[in-house]
Every structure is written in structure tokens, then in C-alpha cells.
Image: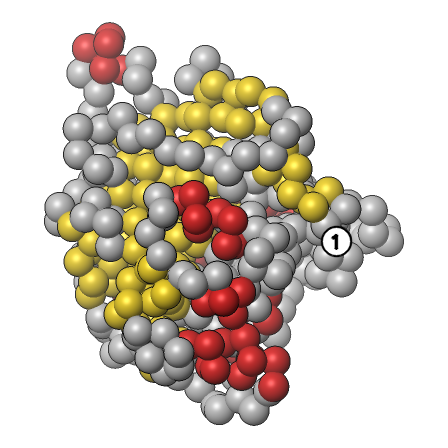
Amino acid sequence: MISKLMVCRLFLSLTILSLTPTFAMEPLQIHYINTGQGGSTLIIGPDGTSVLYDFGVKFGDIALVLYLHSALSGKKQIDYAILSHRHKDHYYGYKDMIDANINVRVANFEPDGPELDSSLINRNWYEPASKTLAGKVRTIPVGLVVSLGDGATMHVIAANGRLLDGTQVDVNDENDRSIVLFINYKNFQYLIDGDLGGGTERCSGHETTQVDVQTFVAKTLLNEKLITAENGLDAMHIAHHGSESSTPLRYVSLVKPEVGIVSVGNPNCKYRHPRRDVLSPLIEDVPKVTSLSGSSLSQCPRINRFKALYQTDLGSESCNTMPTGKETLNAGFVSGDIVLTTDGIKALKVSTSGNLFFDGTLSRLGPQCETTYCLDEYNPTGDSDAKTCI
């Protein structure tokens, strides 16, 4: 979405996005770091508490380390390192971070699950973690609440199919073991859930072997009164890089997000992320999907279109021809590193760096933009207030 409230500039030289807070107090920050076809998200609370959720698939010194040196303002440590689930595209950059002398102070967490005996994960996750101040990797406790300062909190809602309200979903796919974090800061609510599954949904054309954990997450948030049925979430992670294994409309209709973010990269012709079946209903007025036999999109729950959808990079387009709905759709605002900042009261500011990968190298090829969105629970009063956010 480009409007009078979105300011964009196009640069051709590489720089790292640097934030200058405009709020009276330090804002809550959520950084989606472009690490290619993987994921890495840095959360910094109003009091400086830092959480790094996943570490990307690229060599750390190409993307993650460079970004952290800038975003942490010279600090050489983070408080919490959380691996959403044990796949390479989420843990591979961790070792390079530790080798660059960025330490972990409080805890290295992962979801529970069958023990993995892999030299790759041992070398890039378990072994370097044991050398940090936080020590060896531990199973994250569902129900853990971490204070981020000024009333902001991070809640562990689910991991390995176990939910905060006691529900247990049987999971066998490692993606479905993903740790789910909920961030609450006054009027701002946000959810990140790795590669968590949403199950098959015939009306939207989502076909997958992953089970539906996401709908249980949504119901838990509502039942525990962490979100309301009226306002839902302000911002949401689009799980599994926009795969049709996740983000069914039955889930979206419950959490009611305003802004979505996809961590994705290229090439990924094996997966064709992000899929049209996933993104089209979220952002297009006339969605194009391929409903499964005997169903149609009209049978899906109704949702409000997102105000905006952002992608960290392009998904692959130059793949073999696929049926409508199964092909890649780069419908999001393709913008490199994406930073969400909020005062928790009035507005959510989304800033983009424009840093995209080209031939394996980060280059400033995309737009650098800044857009301000009104939080659900904020009611602008007067003309001057109403013009500050959308």
C-alpha cells in the first residue's frame, strides 16, 4: 500500500536500516531481518530486553551479524535466543553470530520434541550455545512470560503442539512444533509462529500434510483474553514463508490482523513461496485461488483485507508453470528488512530498508519506506490526529 502516509525512497547502495525513535519513550521494536529463504526476527522491548527468534539460513556474516551490529547499537549480547523449530533455514546463522562475539545472556530456547542427532545442528546450534553466558539449549516452557519493559510482555503461547490453555495437539511434523510468541504492549498485539501449520482448508485451496495448530492458537488467545474478538491482532507473522501449509482463512478470521509480514527469499522453486492461495485472499479485492474439489472460496470464513502485507524479499517466480493458486505470488510490499515500532498507544510505524538479495549479495535494490498505521484500539480525534496514521 502506497499512500500519502507512506514515504519511499530508492537507493542503490547497501546500508543497514537505522531507527531514530520519534516517540516520547523508547518504542517496542520488531525487526524482520532479510536472511533470504529463512527467518530471523529481533524483538527489542522498551527497556532494551532483546529476543532473537530464529537466526536465518544465510551465513551469519552475510546478513544476520551485520544487521545485529547496527540494530543493537554496539551491544555485544542479546538476552534470549529462541529457535522456533529445528530446521536449517531457522538455525544456520546462530554459530556465526556467536563467532562474531555476540553473546546470549539469559537463555537459549527450543521446543520440546524427539532428540535430533545431526552434525549440522550440533555444529551450528547446540555446540555454540553451550559456550554462551546462557549455557546449553533448554526446552522453552509454555506459559513463560517475559517482561519487555513499560508494561510490554512476551508470552509463550505454544510449543510442540502444547498450548497455554492446556490443549495438546498431536504433532509429528517438525514445523508444527514451532514456538508461538505473543507480544502485548498496551493497545498493540502481535503474534509470531515460525512454520506452524494451519491444516488443509478446501475452500481456500490450502492442501498440506501439516495439522491445524494455528486455529487452536487463535482460540487460546481469545479464551485467555489476550486478544478480543472485535480487535484481534495489529500485526501478524505469515507462517512458513507463505506456504499453503499455514494461514488458513478460518484462522485469519479469528485473529483479525491489520498488517502481515512474510519472511521469504529466492530461489525457492522447490516450495514456490509465498503461494497465491495464501496471499491473494489476504490482500486482493478479487482473490484468485484454486479451491479443492467440491468446494469454493465463498464457503470460507469472511475476513477483512489487510491494510498492508510486507515481504522481506521476492519469492521465486521463474519456476515451472503451476495451476492458478499454486504458483508464487509476490503480492506483498517487497522491501528488505522490515522494522515495526510502536508506542503501544496510538500507532504502529513500519519502516523498510530496501536491502534485497541479488546473486547472493545484499544490495539496496528495493524501496526504503515508512508508513504509520493506527492501532485498533486508538480512536483518532480531530483532523490533526486523524492524519497521522491510516
Instruction: State the SS at label 1.
Output: loop
The amino acid marked with disc number 1 is Pro
Query: Height in image: 235 above or below 174?
Result: above
Percent position (x, y) of residue 120?
61, 80
Which of the pair 115/56 is nearer the observer?
A: 56
Q: Which residue is mark 1?
A: 267
Spot occupied by residue 43 in the image (x, y as percentages of width and height) = 34, 52
Taking 372 as reference, is 225 above or below it? below
Q: Quadrant of residue 132?
A: bottom left
Q: Is residue 335 left or right of residue 5?
A: right
Question: Is 224 left, or right, of 135 in this rendering?
Answer: left
Q: Percent position (x, y) of residue 179?
A: 39, 69
- Foreground: 202 or 354? 354
- Judge from the rendering whether residue 378 lies leftward or rightward of residue 109; answer left or right: left
* Residue displayed at 24% across by 55% down: 49
Visible residue check, residue 6: yes
Considering depth in this image, is 199 or 28 the residue closer to the camera? 28
- Residue 222 visible here: no
Quarter of the rendering occupied by the C terminus: top left
Answer left or right for 201 relative to 44.
Answer: right
Q: What residue lies at 22% left-to-right and 28% top-to-bottom?
A: 23
Question: Vertically, is 137 above or below 102?
Answer: below
Q: Position of residue 165 (x, y in %)?
A: 24, 73
Q: Residue at x 61, y 86 (%)?
A: 119
Compared to residue 369, the image places residue 63 above or below, namely: below
